[in-house]
Amino acid sequence: MDTEKLRQLADNLREQETVADEFRMQRWMDADNYNKIMNTINGEEPCGTAACICGEGLLQFNGVEESTLLTNLISTDIEKRFCDLFDVSSEEFGALAYQTEWPTSFQKRYNDADTDEERRHVAADRIELLIDNYA
């Protein structure tokens, strides 16, 4: 596990130094941001979409180009890229990528969060817990 890179991702989430405009664990592509996605793919504007822990990690650490992440919805490819980039197992990936795999207290904190900033902090804390459990 590349704990240094994971801690940097957690720090970036806390400091809102992110590529995507929004942080959402449940979904990132919907009708509201489809045009933004297509404009990004065509190179007309920056992302302007939302990302989860794994999408943000791939974008921040150059594990994938925005247009590739936006068009490649095959989760196994995203998983492989994230696992390779952060040197985590599939199980560890799942513990971060799927909110349903988070400890109940983290799920509750995330679901009760009112702002994007609060959601980012919960996600950062979840990353730190994974690292702490690994050590």
Image (cartoon, rainbow, N blue to C red):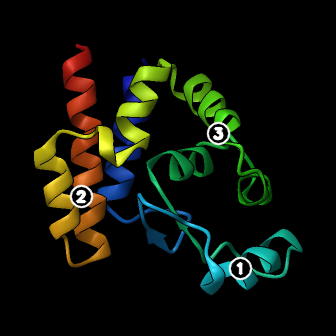
Kindly identify the residue that appears in the image at 42 percent across and 21 percent down. Answer: 91
Q: Position of residue 126 (x, y in %)?
A: 25, 42
Q: Amino acid at mark 2?
A: His
The residue to which callout 2 is attached is 121
Q: Residues within 10 Å of mark 2 (few under 14, many from 20)?
A: many
Q: Position of residue 86 (x, y in %)?
A: 51, 27
Tally of marks? 3
The residue to which callout 3 is attached is 78
Q: Residues within 10 Å of mark 3 (few under 14, many from 20)?
A: some
Q: Helix or strand or loop: what does disc 1 sit on?
A: helix
Left or right of 87: which side holds 96?
left
Kindly identify the residue that appears in the image at 73 percent across and 74 percent down. Answer: 37
The residue to which callout 1 is attached is 34
Quarter occupied by the C terminus: top left
Q: Residues within 10 Å of mark 1 (few under 14, many from 20)?
A: some
Q: Helix or strand or loop: what does disc 3 sit on?
A: helix
CA gap, disc 3 and disc 1: 19 Å
Do the residues bearing badges 2 and 3 touch, measured as CB atoms within 8 Å? no
Kindly identify the residue that appears in the image at 67 percent across and 44 percent down. Answer: 62
Left or right of 126: which side holds 58?
right
Q: Amino acid at mark 1?
A: Tyr
Farthest-out residue, top: 135
Q: Amino acid at mark 3?
A: Ile
Farthest-out residue, left: 105
Which circle, 1 or 2, is nearer the viewer? 1
Q: Tell me if residue 62 comes above or below residue 108 in the rendering.
A: above
Q: Tell me if residue 45 comes above or below residue 62 in the rendering.
A: below
